[in-house]
Each structure stands twice: as C-alpha cells, then as structure tokens.
Image (tube, rainbow, N blue to C red):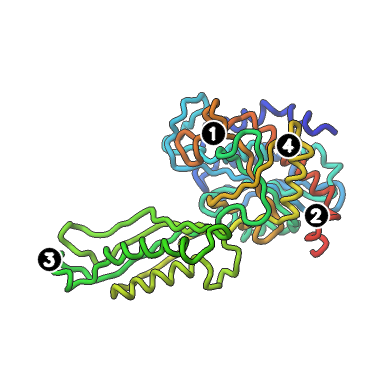
Amino acid sequence: MDVSKLVAEFSDEVIELRRDFHQHPELGLEEHRTSERVVSYLKDCGLEVCRMNKTGVVGLLRGNHSGPTLLLRADMDALPIQEENDVPYKSTNPGVMHACGHDAHTAMLLVAARILTSLKEQLPGNIKFVFEPNEENVGALAMIEEGLLDNPRVDACLGLHIWTPLQSGQIGITGGSVMAGMEHFKLVVKGRGGHTASPQSAIDPIITAAGIIQGVQSIQTREIDVLKEPTIIMFGRIQGGTASNVIPDSVTLEGTLRFLFEGDPQSEDNPKRRFERVVANICSAHRAAYELSFLYGHPTLVNNREMAALVQEVAARELDPAPEIVSFISLAGEDFSEFAARVPAAFYFLGTGNPAKETDFPHHHPRFNIDESVLASGIEMHVRGALSFFKNANQLKFLKRR
C-alpha cells in the first residue's frame, strides 16, 4: 500500500474542495451549505453519517476488525471579515471569509476519510470523522454534550491546524501545553454618577476601570512564571459615559484571558481567580462595586505525550520529503482542548507560510491565504496518523489503562 500515491490521486480534488469552501464561507452554526456538501461526500464514501450541534457532521467508519476508536477532527466555520485577496475563489459572501484555514481543514479531512474508507479492511477499530461547527465559539463542547465521544466510545483524538507563522514544509508538534486556555470576560464597574465639577460627590467608575486595566497586568508579570505558564490579559472593548461633563454610573469592560495553566480550575492560582481578586480589591479601594462574567471559553490544550510522539514519528519517518519538525506553542485559543481534556489527544500545526505565494499573512487577517501545496501533506498526516495509531495501539499505555 502506497499512501503517498493514494494521496496524489486526490491532489486536484482537495484543492477544488478547499476553494469551494473558501468561496462560500459561513459563520458558526450557519454552515448549512458546507455541512450539506460534507454529508453528501461522506455518504458517497459509504460512511454512517449523523448531524450534531445544528450544522455539525460526524461520519463513522467501522473497521472490519474490533479495536479502539479514533476521532479525527476538522472545523468548518468562517469569520466575520471582509476578504481583501484578489483570487478567483474569493469569498462571495460579503463580510465573511475563511481567514483561519478551516476551509482547508474540512477539505483535507474529507479526502482522508475517502482514502481511509478504501483501507477499511486493514483497520482494527473505528474512526469518527468530526466536522465541527462554530469552533470560534467553542462548538466542540455542544457536540460532546450531545454524545460525540460515545457509541462507540472514543479512545483517542487527532487534529491539525494550517499555520501561516510556520513555513511551508514545517510541522509543529509538542507534548504538553500547546495552545492557550481562553476566557472571554465582561466586567461592569459600578460607581455613582455625578457632575465632573464635583467628583467628590460621585464614585467614578472610569478611574476605577483605569486602575483595573493597569492593575491586572501585574498578574502576568509579577505573579506567574512567564516561562512556565505564559498568561495574557487583554481588554478589547471599553464602554461608558454619555457626555464629557458627566460622571457615569458604570463602565463596561470586555476582553480575554489567555493562559497555559494546567492546574486545578478551582485553585487560587487559576488566572480567572487571580483576575477577580485584583478586580475586587481595586473596586474596594475606589468604593465601587462590580459584576464579572466569564461568557465562554475553554481549557488549555494539553497534548498527550504518547499521542504527540506518535505524530512526530509519523512526520519524521513516513512523509517524503520529510518535513522540518519544530516545537511550537501558541497563545491562540483552540477548542480542540475540550476533546483533549477528556480523551488522550494530539494537536499539531501544518506550516503554510510562503512569502513568494503571499501566504504569510497572520490568521484572522483579511489577506489570509494558504499555500495549497501543503494540502497533500495534511491528508497524508491524517491517513498515516490513523494507521499508525491502530498499528501501535497495543503499545500505548493509556489504552492499557482503560
């Protein structure tokens, strides 16, 4: 069996799929056209197909022999960004574009599903091909709550992400923490309104908010070892006041916490708890009250070291030409962490940065694009990663413990 030859047979198809998804981007939980095409493709492969979390799709491949179940995942949602690329497959949906590579993820996993289905007789176990909606807003959690990891029970997970900060020909894989836990927060600072000519008669939420913005920065530089658990606290929105001579009753702050914290969520060391402690004390010092809400988020993405080693072995020994393997960690958020928090998993990065092809713009940029020559490597990593998992299942310690 020559996996590289099988992948090469679909080199045009994967590009066609990716460009079609790119040209017709859809926001989270609105991926109706995308999911219809995914369903049709998976059914054409002969897989059992079901829908989850509104627009999510799962294809189940049952191997000819009993064994563990592996989950392979791609995400499908686009972003609310107006595309600025001048390409034939430019987004036709105004204000929406695939600026994070999810179009490529979906295309690569579809082709991998077709190839792995053709190898069904060799599979001692099952594969769930998961096409997740709404990744930008933690769509994975809803799928898990609907029973994604059951019937059959998932034993391990693999996922990859196209990554423009890495050069084409590089693969980033690391054991342990690899992507940030993330929390979106909303903080309402409550004071007492008044006239700017008599600030002593009011409780000024603006100066309190300013103290909070400055004060919480000490968490990431004075309380946490930046080499072990990098943490970023960012404010993206501030709203308050109606006139220049009026002290408002309240100010609303919104932003994100990002961290590589792996400890007990209830611990006082958790960045969320540190954040609220500082907020509470600053508000108390200014005689103000507050309401703090963590709107949505996900834990730190922690790669199982056995699964990460398996991916690294596949990339180093089975791809031709062999890619440059680099250790890579990012403080971007990724809700694959919801899978990794429940099942041994590995998430890795497929470099697609190529200045000559203008594919080195950052993710979420209106000029984001990918080097399509790496799509074949992504398919091959999916296929070889799955085959290696089943081949080495008897040696994986976490499977022996289950």
Residue 46 at x, y percent in the picture: 75, 40
- Residue at image coords 50%, 39%: 362
- Residue at image coords 41%, 64%: 216
Secondary structure, mark 1, is helix
Residue 239 at x, y percent in the picture: 30, 57
Mark 4 highlights which residue?
Answer: 380
- Residue at image coords 66%, 59%: 147
Location of residue 254 (image quadrant): bottom left
- Badge 4, how many Cα within 10 Å: few under 14, some, many 20+? many
Mark 1 highlights which residue?
Answer: 22
What's under tag 3, amino acid-wise?
A: Ala
- Badge 2, how many Cα within 10 Å: few under 14, some, many 20+? many
The residues bearing labels 4 and 2 have C-alpha atoms spaced at a distance of 21 Å
Residue 400 at x, y percent in the picture: 83, 62
Number of the front mark, 1 or 4: 4
Secondary structure, mark 4, is helix
Which circle's residue, 4 or 3, is located before the other in the chain? 3
Which circle's residue, 1 or 4, is located before the other in the chain? 1
Asked if the residue at tag 4 contacts the one at tag 1, i.e. Cβ–Cβ closer than 8 Å, the answer is no
Which of the numbered marks, if any, corresponds to residue 68?
A: 2
Number of the front mark, 1 or 3: 3
The residues bearing labels 2 and 1 have C-alpha atoms spaced at a distance of 34 Å
Asked if the residue at tag 3 contacts the one at tag 4, i.e. Cβ–Cβ closer than 8 Å, the answer is no
What's under tag 1, amino acid-wise?
A: His
Mark 3 highlights which residue?
Answer: 197
Which circle's residue, 2 or 1, is located before the other in the chain? 1
- Badge 1, how many Cα within 10 Å: few under 14, some, many 20+? many
Number of the front mark, 4 or 3: 3
Quadrant of the drawing holding the C terminus: bottom right
- Residue at image coords 71%, 57%: 344
